[in-house]
């Protein structure tokens, strides 16, 4: 492992970009989808299969790992890559989002946030500096600044206050990151809700501080898709073209298609893995709810053209049976199929950008999604 | 797929036998351990890994499959091998054991047993003939006669009554099996509790009827190990040497070592898979409870000499973390490691019989089991 973190733009198609992030642990082809490995495991999957599906990078959650097993313990065991058995790039979030969504008794102040663990009630403190320290201990290839995530809708004054606080935390994060090993990257996070003025201010201020990449946070939290996409479109205009752009927590395949067309380079979302544990398959021809009785005698696989054994080699009747019988193998196969489908989608997006036919690819892809009866 | 069912004795060491069962779907090296695939899945495992671990055959449960998804449905989908994606031999039990242990309102009569499904309360009837019909529909390579399993201890008169009923069911099973496709086998089941006189009568009567193989049922139901082993030893004397002998539901590795030494050829048990879902690992050096906090910072794998990636490539600290976090991957890895260890044990037993050193192998193996602190 040597080398610097860098981002190369290989091709564009309108606002869409085909790029490549280089890290000491390997390359990340963009637009990229990062499967979520919350607690040092992509739930219900072997990481060999995650890799074989085409994933160049996975995401892990600072909040979960700081509570259990603890960042210092993972560091003592050789870091997160070794701990979970994934030698390729890892991005860690800063913990801010989960503090807001999972922890109890959270209290946000200028210094940072204190909260009670949702696991055992123990009190924890997370400051911008501690979030960086934890991510350094984990050995993340890409670290995220701590930010304050609000639930939308929220009053504009509150959105503005949280955005400004996140900017001050961004500066502190950058300073704290100065001692990080060579080749590791830190991303700033644009906040500002769905208010263009606030998003623009946040993006410009972050660009002035200077990060290896820029995330768009605080979206996909319940707002309509058009509000999310117009915010993405406006925010991207304010971000440096030479750095990767990461839309956090997004999303449905349709959101990814639309956001990639607007110049987003990186995505993560629990949907493919969570859906896999809830009987829902994402396929080339649309979503399939395997719990539905109409699959009980259907000998067809999810997708006979898929390169993924889970999608190609098992009948819907068998998957339906596994789901009805609450068998772990059902979640294992459907998660695998979903992660593979998301990677197949990203591959298609990347190829289409290079061929300058992303709009056509998106239209064809969306048309295909209507083929499975809903 | 063609050919007949046959059993060849390749070597002996005392009462222990190294053999090979030939079926149209492949060979089964004996002594063999059959991982349990209750509901058409070896819980928490991909069947590719089951196969790679060295298993020649898996077991599936008639009771579970007749209730869900139903034998006729599996037959319409091409049979159990195709349904679950396991082209190798499958043994199905007759359903009798699960009717006694799981179903409600069961009523045993001369004709058979009626019971209420533990899933939805629907009433079902299982006769010797229906049990064979179901197993034929599933396409089992080895079918088992329906028998009545008692919970031990039971009054001797009751054990005798159930044994005699099981013998009459054995005759009816054999007649019902006459139309089965070529190459498929039917095993009779010796009953009689831990009473030598009853076991001998049952074994002799079954041998007189004539089966492809003989199972010893009704053991490993709570009796002491020495009672089980002496029953096995006496029963084996009454069974034809030219047919395989199957000790149902056994057991701990120590039980398997002891019973193989007494001439048993086949085993099945839920222990390796169930233990894998409950944080318990079986290894060459003994059992390891991964829930124990002493593993939290242990960088060692379960067994660095194992050929199984689950046992060899992940730290105990990681496995402990997965177990504590209730992550599915914990069950997936531990089940895989356990199934692989059981197959490694069977491989060792087979090699030792050929080398006529089973007693030494058993002593060495048992000594190794004490190496992990309990």
Image: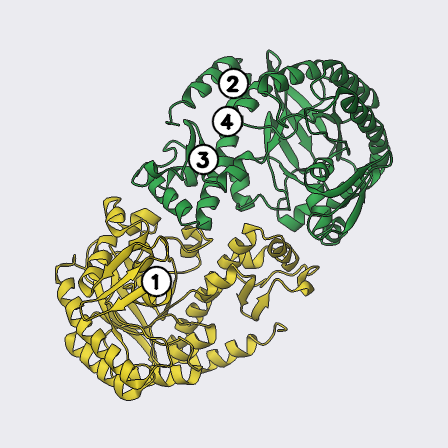
Chain colours: A yellow, B green
In this view, the residue in front, B350 or A39, is A39
Q: Position of residue B38 (x, y in %)?
A: 63, 42
Q: Give above or below for A171 relative to B84.
A: below
User: Mark 1 to mark 4: distance in Å?
Assistant: 47 Å
Q: Quadrant of residue A286?
A: bottom right
Using a 10 Å C-alpha cutoff, classify the residue at mark 4 as few (fewer than 14 neighbours), some (14 to 19) or many (20 or more): many
Q: Quadrant of residue B367?
A: top left
Q: Position of residue A340 (x, y in %)?
A: 47, 61
Disc 4 target residue: B345
Would residue A211 appear left or right of B272 to someone viewing this image? left
Does residue B174 appear in the picture of this structure?
yes
State which tag comes first along the sequence, 3 or 4: 3
Disc 1 target residue: A103
Which mark is in front, 2 or 1?
A: 1
Disc 2 target residue: B352
Subunit bearing disc 3:
B
Counting the numbered discs, the total is 4
User: Mark 3 to mark 1: distance in Å?
Assistant: 33 Å
């Amino acid at each position: 492992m040597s080398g610097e973190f860098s981002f190369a733009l290989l091709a564009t198609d309108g606002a869409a970009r085909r790029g490549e992030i280089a890290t000491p642990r390997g390359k990340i082809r963009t637009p990229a989808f990062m499967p979520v490995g919350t607690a040092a495991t992509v739930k219900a999957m072997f990481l060999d299969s995650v890799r074989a599906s085409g994933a160049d990078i996975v995401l892990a959650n600072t909040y979960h790992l700081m509570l259990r097993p603890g960042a210092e313990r993972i560091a003592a065991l050789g870091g997160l890559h070794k701990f979970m058995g994934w030698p390729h790039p890892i991005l860690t979030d800063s913990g801010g989002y989960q503090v807001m969504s999972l922890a109890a008794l959270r209290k946000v102040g200028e210094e940072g946030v204190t909260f009670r663990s949702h696991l055992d009630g123990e009190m924890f403190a997370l400051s911008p500096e501690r979030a960086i320290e934890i991510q350094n201990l984990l050995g993340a290839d890409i670290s995220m600044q701590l930010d304050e995530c609000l639930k939308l809708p929220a009053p504009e004054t509150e959105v503005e206050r949280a955005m400004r606080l996140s900017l001050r935390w961004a500066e502190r994060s950058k300073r704290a990151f100065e001692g990080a090993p060579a080749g590791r990257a830190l991303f700033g996070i644009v906040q500002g809700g769905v208010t263009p003025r606030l998003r623009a201010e946040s993006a410009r201020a972050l660009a002035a501080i200077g990060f290896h990449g820029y995330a768009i946070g605080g979206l996909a939290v319940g707002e309509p898709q058009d509000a999310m996409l117009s915010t993405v479109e406006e925010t991207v205009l304010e971000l440096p073209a030479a750095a990767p752009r990461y839309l956090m927590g997004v999303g449905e395949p349709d959101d990814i298609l639309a956001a990639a067309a607007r110049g987003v380079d990186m995505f993560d979302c629990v949907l493919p893995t969570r859906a896999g544990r809830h009987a829902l398959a994402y396929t080339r021809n649309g979503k399939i709810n395997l719990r539905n009785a109409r699959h009980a005698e259907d000998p067809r696989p999810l997708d006979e053209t898929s390169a993924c054994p889970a999608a190609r080699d098992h009948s819907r009747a068998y998957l339906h049976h596994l789901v009805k019988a609450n068998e772990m193998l059902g979640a294992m196969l459907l998660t695998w199929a979903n992660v593979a489908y998301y990677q197949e989608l990203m591959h298609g997006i990347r190829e289409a950008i290079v061929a300058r036919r992303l709009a056509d690819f998106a239209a064809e892809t969306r048309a295909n999604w209507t083929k499975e009866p809903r």
